[in-house]
Image (cartoon, rainbow, N blue to C red):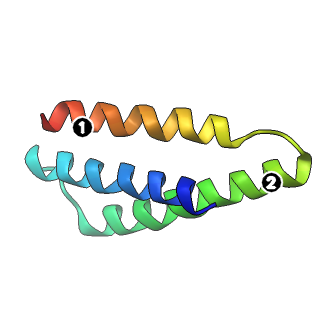
Amino acid sequence: YVAIGILACTDSVLGGLRAHLTRNFNLSIFISGFFGNALISVLLIWLGNKLNIQLSIAAIVVYGSRVFQNFGFLR
C-alpha cells in the first residue's frame, strides 16, 4: 500500500512542479490531486487484494508512466 501511495504522491509533486513551470499552478488543485491520487491508488490496491486480482500492476503502470512524462518535461 505504502509504495503505491508514494508513487502516486510523487506523480502529484512532479505534476505540481510542471504546472508551476508552465505558470498553471493552483494550490487547491494540487492538494486535492495529492491526497486524491494517494487515496485512489491505495483503495485500488485494497480492492485488488479483496478480489484476488493484481491491480497494483495497473497502478504502477499508470502512475509510473505519468512520473516519467512529468520528469521528462521538467528535464
Q: Residue at x 60, y 54 (%)?
A: 41
| Quarter where residue 65 is shown | top left
Q: Which is nearer the eye, 37 or 68?
A: 68
CA neighbours of label 1 inside 10 A, class few (<14), some (14 to 19), many (20+): some
Q: Quadrant of the C terminus?
A: top left
Q: Along the horizontal axis of the image, is 52 left or right of 61? A: right
Q: Which is nearer the eye, 3 or 8?
A: 3
Three-letter code for the amino acid on which mark 1 is drawn: Phe
Question: Which residue is tagged 2?
Answer: 47
Question: Which residue is tagged 1?
Answer: 71
Q: Along the horizontal axis of the image, is 35 left or right of 40? A: left
Q: Residue at x 46, y 59 (%)?
A: 6
- Residue 22: percent from the left, percent from the top? 11, 43
- Say which element carries label 1: helix
Asked if the residue under mark 1 is in contact with the one under mark 2, i.e. CB atoms within 8 Å, the reply is: no
- Of the numbered discs 2 and 1, the one sitting upstream in the chain is 2
- Residue 11: percent from the left, percent from the top? 37, 49
- Say which element carries label 2: helix
Disc number placed over residue 51 in the picture, else none = none
Q: Quadrant of the N terminus?
A: bottom right
Q: Which is nearer the eye, 60 or 38?
A: 60
Three-letter code for the amino acid on which mark 2 is drawn: Leu
Question: Is 47 drawn above or below residue 68 in the view shown?
Answer: below
Q: Residue at x 32, y 69 (%)?
A: 28
Q: Residue furthest right?
A: 51
Q: Along the horizontal axis of the image, is 52 left or right of 65? A: right
Give the tally of numbered discs: 2
| Quarter where residue 30 is shown | bottom left
Q: CA distance from mark 2 to mark 1?
A: 29 Å
Question: Is 33 drawn above or below residue 48 in the view shown?
Answer: below
- Residue 21: percent from the left, percent from the top? 9, 47
